[in-house]
Amino acid sequence: MNALTHLAPLAAVMLVAATACSSETRNGQSTQADAGVPPRKPDPGVDSKSAHYRGYVAMNEILRSRLVAKPTSFTLSQYLEDPSSDAGTGLVLAKLLGDWSGDGSRNAFQNGDPNAMSLVIWRMAFTGLGKDVASLCPGASKLRTIPDFELRSSLVPVVQSLCTWPQDQAREDTVLRSFWQGLTGYDAPPKEYEAWREEFLGPTFQNATAETLITTMVTAALLNPYVLLEQ
């Protein structure tokens, strides 16, 4: 099931924020059970038949260029490690997110097709990243997965504004748009930003903490098919 290509921005948000949310496809239509949002037809901008993940390595490069300043060796696998297991669990899971394997003429891109398991792994990684971003807020938990985590300087004042949520400063369109672009670049069309913004300005996050808001914003933006899939 190529479920990811059918996820609307609101569905991506609800996937992270709702306590019970499932997705299934019937007759080419996607439904989000218990998500509180109506079904939406697949976006013609994303080819659900041929689209595949950009891949684990590519997403790390994108995040280092847009969002993460330090560590320069930043990788999402650090958010996939199991503390109760030997080191290296994260790299094993990362291979399920799209990875080049083989040598010479037999080198091939594997695990690039979206599926339910890989979507859970992406969500786990992006949620961990979102928590590290949110931990930069004053008064937030400082227990970061990556202790020396730092944002790119252009995004520091943006996150500082979001840290004041639910104050008006954090709701300004310039702040929200800057954060969205810091996460997605210009991969997604304007309507994707508008839907993302509308959800976070709506009642669901009206009284949310800044930590919850920022974590969910990061996760929802990066799960957007225009960001995660090769176009």
Image (tube, grey):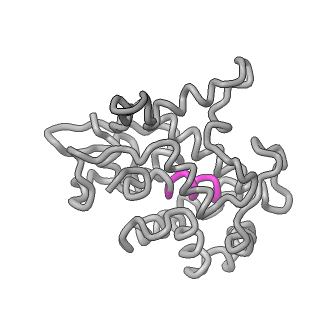
In front of the other: 183 or 219? 183
Magenta span: chief secondary structure: helix
Q: Is residue 194 above or below residue 84?
A: below
Q: Residue at x 56, y 25 (%)?
A: 92
The answer to if 220 sits in the magenta stretch is yes
Residue farthest top in this picture: 85
Q: Position of residue 160 (x, y in %)?
A: 75, 70
Residue farthest front in this picture: 104
Q: Position of residue 167 (x, y in %)?
A: 70, 74
138 relative to 161 in the view: left or right: right
Q: Quadrant of the C terminus?
A: bottom left
Q: Is residue 15 above or below residue 184?
A: above
Range shown magenta: 213-221
105 relative to 123 in the view: left or right: left
Q: Position of residue 195 (x, y in %)?
A: 41, 66
Q: Quadrant of the N terminus?
A: top left
Q: Residue at x 43, y 51 (%)?
A: 228
Q: Position of residue 193 (x, y in %)?
A: 44, 69
In front of the other: 74 or 6? 74
Q: Residue at x 65, y 48 (%)?
A: 129
Residue 76: which quarter of the image? top right
Residue 83: which quarter of the image? top right
Residue farthest left in this picture: 27
The answer to if 118 sits in the magenta stretch is no
